[in-house]
Image (cartoon, grey):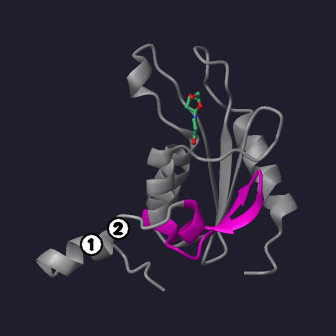
């Protein structure tokens, strides 16, 4: 995936960021991802008066991914309100791992990194398969 159009992906993330519902933190986040079938999915954060109920932008993006037929994320860009690359929180790195696997590329403040470096020694479907024989998730191991 050396030919990822990061400018276009970032533009999708910025567009999504402008839809953020962040009246409590005032910290708008947008994220966009390329899917292995060519789709683009995106999301913004949606906060709640019950602070812990807040949905990160990545949650919305993954919901759109699954709702739209699933598939594997190949590249993801997450941005803050300044349109700068933002590192996904720990929980969202886990979401990206499930739906992108180790080779999904992420635009970070330190450049483009594979998820295998963003979430080293990740827990994933293979850990379940290893013990139970069936995980149920998609194969993201390659
Ligand atoms: N946020 C995200 O949407 N994604 C992340 O990966 C980091 C944090 C949101 C959640 C909350 O609405 C705001 O940023 C401040 O934490």
Mark-to-mark CA distance, 1 and 2:
6 Å
**Side of 110 where 123 appears, left or right:** left
* Position in image of residue 120 (x %, y %): 49, 65
Name the residue: 70% across, 42% down: 16
Q: Are marks 1 and 2 in contact (CB under 8 Å)?
A: yes
Name the residue: 21% across, 79% down: 130
The quarter in which the N terminus is drawn is bottom right
- What is the residue that sits farthest to the left in this orientation? 132
Ligand 1 visible in quadrant? top right
Quickly name the residue at label 1.
Answer: 127
Answer above or below: position of 102 versus 42: below
Answer above or below: position of 25 versus 84: above
Name the residue: 61% across, 78% down: 37
Asked whether residue 136 appears in the rendered view, the answer is no
Asked whether residue 29 appears in the rendered view, the answer is yes
* Position in image of residue 44 (x %, y %): 62, 38
Answer above or below: position of 30 versus 52: below
**Side of 80 where 100 appears, left or right:** left
**Magenta range:** 98-118
């Amino acid at each position: 995936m050396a030919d990822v159009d990061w400018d276009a992906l970032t533009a999708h993330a910025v567009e999504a960021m402008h839809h953020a519902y962040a009246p409590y933190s005032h910290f708008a986040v947008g994220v966009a991802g390329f899917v292995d079938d060519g789709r683009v999915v995106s999301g913004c954060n949606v906060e709640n008066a019950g602070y812990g109920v807040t949905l990160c932008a990545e949650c919305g993006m993954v919901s759109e991914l699954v709702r739209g037929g699933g598939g594997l994320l190949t590249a993801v860009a997450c941005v803050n309100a300044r349109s700068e690359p933002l590192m996904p929180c720990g929980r969202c790195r886990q979401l990206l791992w499930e739906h992108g696997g180790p080779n999904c590329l992420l635009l970070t403040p330190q450049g483009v990194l594979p998820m295998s470096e963003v979430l080293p020694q990740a827990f994933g479907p293979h850990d379940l398969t290893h013990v139970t024989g069936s995980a149920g998730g998609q194969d993201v191991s390659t």
